[in-house]
Amino acid sequence: MSDPQDSAIGVAVLGLGNVGSQVVRIIEESAADLEARIGAPLVVRGIGVRRVGDDRGVAPDLLTDDIEKLVSRDDVDIVVEVMGPVEPARKAILAALEQGKSVVTANKALMAVSAGELAQAAESAHVDLYFEAAVAGAIPVIRPLTQSLAGDTVLRVAGIVNGTTNYILSEMDSTGADYTSALADAGALGYAEADPTADVEGYDAAAKAAILASIAFHTRVTADDVYREGMTKVSAADFASARALGCTIKLLAICERLIDDEGRERVSARVYPALVPLEHPLASVNGAFNAVVVEAEAAGRLMFYGQGAGGAPTASAVLGDLVMAARNRVQGGRGPRESKYAKLPIAPIGFIPTRYYVNMNVADRPGVLSAVAAQFSKREVSIAEVRQEGMVDEEGQRCGARIVVVTHQATDAALSETVAALADLDVVQNINSVLRLEGTTE
Ligand code: NAP
């Protein structure tokens, strides 16, 4: 009788943390189904970790801290990289690809800086490189963009792709909490890391925006090409103003195909907190959930929604890639290669048409509103809405006024110049906040 292990697909799993432990569990628990779907059994040959011990919930002889040796084993066909961060993951993946192993990774930070180098290595070795789990956890978005929409023209991809910041902003919106206490709540519930910088300053979302823009627009976009603003300055007062305007505030990753007056196409990839009208589909994505809205020429608007992080949801996306890579090994052939033929230039942020919300404290005297309005009209920025309210100090004395201006669409350059000019006006005491308004084109 032939040994069933002869036809087995050997898998090395790098990492046994939140995601890796779930990947190994699903491979074990769903072995029979996975074998039927692939046409061969999946066998975990080894698991790469830092701490090798016998209390890790897996057979101790599978564990190794020698990643280089593990990915080089002859009986390993596919390497699943779920250890992060950029290094040593990059080195391990390159070694695996160069030795003809297909690779599945969940590492967004790495894909956002090294996608080109890794894709080239996969190309040279004629193997697969899959990374569905790198963007929005369980939500299928990479495969729909690379395969389902391969015949369409994607115009825009906008999403909430970071669960930590969405949890914090949702809390601020629903409870009136300020940023600091909403962040503390997120930490206590395990939604925020001890050092939340990558999330709250938008680095994580920017890495995902780079990956999405590259795929959607067939152009290599790296994390450095993404314009990024974090959400730490969003205040409870901003939420109150947003509500009054029929909006909420979300940290958005936006990837857009832009056409200038001469018909030249460019790509914009950007991350910032923005006002979103309550009727927009992204406004109702709350808590740690993620969602991505794709607009394509022929398909129109598509929305993908679900769990953007967590061990099991992320492992689901990893397993999907693993099954695809294993099927390709069994049946022959490869998945889609990197598509970068369009080579569109990156649009600077100043070029982007957008709308601003500006909240400022001003002197409470006649003529202030017209002085403020003059700065907008001087730069041909049209005002859509103005709200003014008097402010009182602790003794109940009038101490100035607050003006909130919402603009119509103008270039980001004209809008930011206007804000700089407002800050220089004698009558403006303080610019409290400036946020963009997305989801409308007026
Ligand atoms: P984690 O819980 O911190 O686990 C990391 C694992 O990798 C641990 O088992 C660790 O070994 C191992 N490891 C780290 N550095 C290593 C090294 N130098 N050599 C050998 N092993 C090493 O991380 P995670 O949350 O599972 O995330 C893993 C990857 O998935 C990251 O790239 C992350 O960005 C990505 N991802 C995670 C999520 C999520 O919800 N967690 C979602 C999407 C994508 P020890 O156990 O011995 O320390």
Image (cartoon, helix red, strand yellow):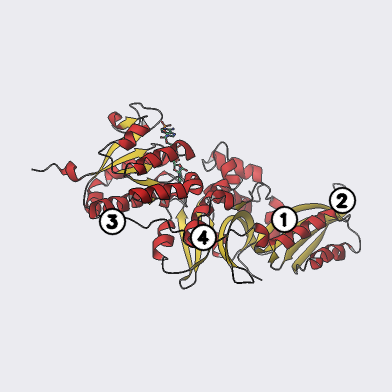
Up the image or down, 246 lies above or below 118; here it is below
Mark 3 neighbour class, 10 Å CA radius: few under 14, some 14 to 19, many 20 or more: few
* Residue 423, image x, y percentages: 81, 54
Q: CA distance from mark 3 to mark 2?
A: 75 Å
Q: CA distance from mark 4 to mark 3?
A: 26 Å
Which of pointers 1 and 3 lies earlier in the amino acid sequence?
3
Where on the image, by quarter, is ligand 1?
A: top left
Q: Amino acid at mark 2?
A: Gly
* Residue 26, image x, y percentages: 31, 45
Q: Residue at x 86, y 56 (%)?
A: 425
Q: Amino acid at mark 4?
A: Lys
**Residue 333 bears which disc, if any?**
3
Q: Residue at x 47, y 60 (%)?
A: 218
The residue identified by callout 1 is: 434
- Quarter of the picture containing the N terminus is top left
**Residue 343 bears which disc, if any?**
4
- Nearer mark to the viewer, of 1 and 3: 3
Q: CA distance from mark 1 to mark 3?
A: 51 Å
Q: Secondary structure at mark 3?
A: loop
Q: CA distance from mark 4 to mark 1?
A: 33 Å
Q: Amino acid at mark 1?
A: Val
Q: Secondary structure at mark 2?
A: loop
Mark 1 neighbour class, 10 Å CA radius: few under 14, some 14 to 19, many 20 or more: many
Which of pointers 4 and 3 lies earlier in the amino acid sequence?
3
Which of pointers 3 and 2 lies earlier in the amino acid sequence?
3
- Quarter of the picture containing the C terminus is bottom right
The residue identified by callout 2 is: 396
Furthest toward the left, the residue is: 1
* Residue 342, image x, y percentages: 49, 63
